[in-house]
Image: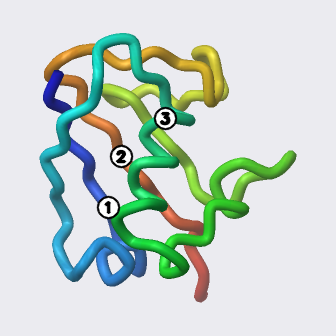
Amino acid sequence: MRIIVKAFATLREIFGGTGILYLELPEGSTIKDLLEKLREQYGSNLDVSGFVDENPSVKILVNGREITYLDGLGTRLRDGDSIAFIPPVAGG
């Protein structure tokens, strides 16, 4: 299945300077599987702890819905899904 990954703000740099990635994943993959694939591709540049700790600093949305309101890291992905990674906002 093919999914779209959108990275915003500082996360663009981590994902090679682009804001949009198109990835192939096996059927039945979850957000956790996606994070593992991204970690394989981008290595130590991707700090997974910001995505998976008790109070994640990076918001993950699937088709516009935050995964905390779905099945968390176990949220199953489907062909054509759009996943957005939104880092915390700072400044004033």
State the residue at coordinates (18%, 17%): 79
Q: Mark 1 belongs to which amino acid?
A: Ala
Residue at 68 percent across and 63 percent down: it is: 50
Q: Are marks 2 and 1 in contact (CB under 8 Å)?
A: yes
Query: Which image quarter is the C terminus in?
Result: bottom right
Read off the residue under disc 2: 84
Which mark lies nearer to you, 3 or 2? Answer: 3
Q: Amino acid at mark 2?
A: Ala
Q: Residues within 10 Å of mark 2 (few under 14, many from 20)?
A: many
| Dot 1: element | strand
Q: Quadrant of residue 14?
A: bottom left
Q: Position of residue 35 (x, y in %)?
A: 49, 47
Q: Amino acid at mark 3?
A: Asp
Horizontal relation, residue 40 to residue 51: left or right: left
Residue at the spot 17% in from the left edge and 73% down from the top edge: 18
Q: Separation of disc 1 and disc 3 at Cα? A: 17 Å
Residue 33 is labelled as 3
Mark 3 or mark 2: whose residue is earlier in sequence? 3
Residue 46 percent across, percent down from the top left: 51, 71
Q: Residue 27 in the image: state x and y as whole percent.
A: 29, 13
Badges 3 and 2: C-beta atoms under 8 Å apart? no
Nearer-N-terminus badge (1/3): 1
- Give the SS element for disc 3: helix
Q: Residues within 10 Å of mark 1 (few under 14, many from 20)?
A: many
Instruction: Specify which label sits upstream in the sequence, 2 or 1.
Output: 1
Q: Quadrant of residue 42?
A: bottom left
The image position of residue 24, as x and y in percent, is: 18, 36
On screen, residue 63 above or below 45: above
Res. 59 mark: none
- Labelled disc at residue 7: 1
